[in-house]
Image: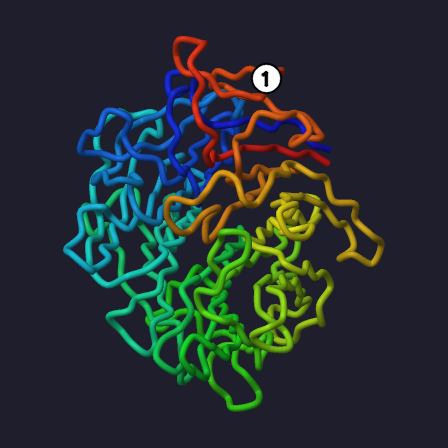
Amino acid sequence: MLQRLVNLIPPALSGEANQDSEPNIAVNPANTNQMVATAFTPDPLQGPNAPIYVSRDGGQTWALRTVVPGDGPAGTGDISVGFASGSGILYVGILSADAPANQTRLQILRNTSYLSTATMPVLVDRLGVDQPWVVAASAQDQAGQAADHVYVGNNDLAAQPKTATVDLSLNAAAAAAPAGFATHRIEAGAPVGQDGPPIRIAVHPAGTIYAAHQRWTAVSGNNITFEVVVTRDDNWATAANPFAALTDPADGSVGMRAATGLTAVWNGSMGQERLGADSAIAVDPTNRDVVWIAWGDQPGGARAPWTIHVRRSVDGGQTWSGDLRTVSKGKNPCLAVNAAGHLGFLCQALIGRGTAQRWETTFEVTTDGWATAAVPTVLHTALAASPAFTFLPYLGDYARVVAADNAFYGVFSGSNHPDRANFPNGVTYQRNVDWNAHRLLDLDGTTAVPDSIDPFFFTWTD
């Protein structure tokens, strides 16, 4: 059941009206009161660093730490976060705001204390990369000592056309920069132009690592044909050529195609949001062979609605089911599996017609892969046309859900219009608000603040 839904904007930022989209979250598995969240949030004091959101009480309250090097109009660029399961060290992947004109700049960061106010040290720094995605874990090294294993999926456009990449370190906590990080291409096929932006990773606690990417097979203008490809490593990606455990019987190449012949219109639009790439992957911590994937495409061609698909493999990614769940006009699918083997699924969908269209964010849990219906819980619903976007992405190219023990923790972004009808299962705002008048209020508690996009946190337990 839903335990908590919280607007992350702290009381001291009650006057802000930024488009705080594209959120991400990390929860310390050793102490789930410790959390870090991110979004396109600039430093309110316009300093040299961008902020992260931190919570020390399980997400009930949130504060800012301006510790991410580089600050721009939207804070940092793409950002994702992960706690190592043993050390509690926070790892961060960003597209730095301090990048040369018309280029992207990947930086991988490390913070030994998530509450630190010091600027995070940079471990990796290179140009031409898109959408870093951080997953961290802890395991014993060959000497029997605990070590942080960190995997950063990214789309390395400097390696075109085989751009699907994982930067990984098997000892990220102890080593000086670059902290053991090395770059590994996971694309073994022949993409046209490049792979899609999202490269997603799932880690099983026994050392099986899955990575999912989208291989572009044809490009005509903005029309893309692509495949969803899953690769796997069975020993923490310690070999010289990792992620080679899965091969496609059709051609013997590394990586299994879980879906083929998919179509999408790159940078299409829906409800003020851009379209082109959605992806998620999750592995069952109780069974390393059970893995789930989700993606978005337009089945039937360019005029078809953007649709989210969820599929499952029970043999380590070698074979895949058909669609077990679909969401028409869906966006930002998120998957996570808890310690009971139950799958949590978050999705944001455009519902209704015309000026009445709304973005609706739902979360549901299935214990049997939707063999019996799972009833979605509506976390948030708001008019899709308001507030007006100030940049793209509007809600974000992704949201995120993670699991620890039997609980799920997630973040999404949406309109902060203060109407309780928009939160049918309840919500808590930290920022000043007048619920009766449906107004956001500045620090003085009187002056009205315009609606904008805010990040929201939720937690769910079975």
Q: Residue at x 57, y 81 (%)?
A: 261
> Can you tell which quarter of the image residue 449 is in?
top left
Density class for disc 1 (Cα within 10 Å; few <14, some 14-19, many ≥20) is few
Q: Amino acid at mark 1?
A: Ala
Q: Position of residue 319 (x, y in %)?
A: 65, 75
Instruction: Name the residue furthest front.
Output: 355
Residue named by callout 1: 437
Measured along the vertical axis of the image, is residue 325 above or below residue 445? below
Q: Identify the residue at the far left of this view.
A: 100
Up-down relation of residue 402 to residue 7 (above or below):
below
Q: State the residue in front, 269 or 33.
A: 269
On screen, residue 104 versus residue 443, left or right, reads left
Query: Which residue does the image show at 22% across and 52% down from the upper left?
Result: 124
Whole-percent x and y of residue 379?
65, 36
Instruction: State which quarter of the image contains the C terminus.
Output: top right
Give the total number of marks visible in the rendering: 1
Residue at 43%, 62% in the rendered image:
199
Q: Secondary structure at mark 1?
A: loop
Q: How is the image coloured?
A: rainbow
The percent coordinates of residue 356 (x first, y second) are 66, 45
Query: Which quarter of the rendering shows the N terminus?
Result: top right
Measured as percent of width and height from the top left, residue 249 is found at 57, 87
- From the viewer's side, name the closer residue of 173 and 23: 23
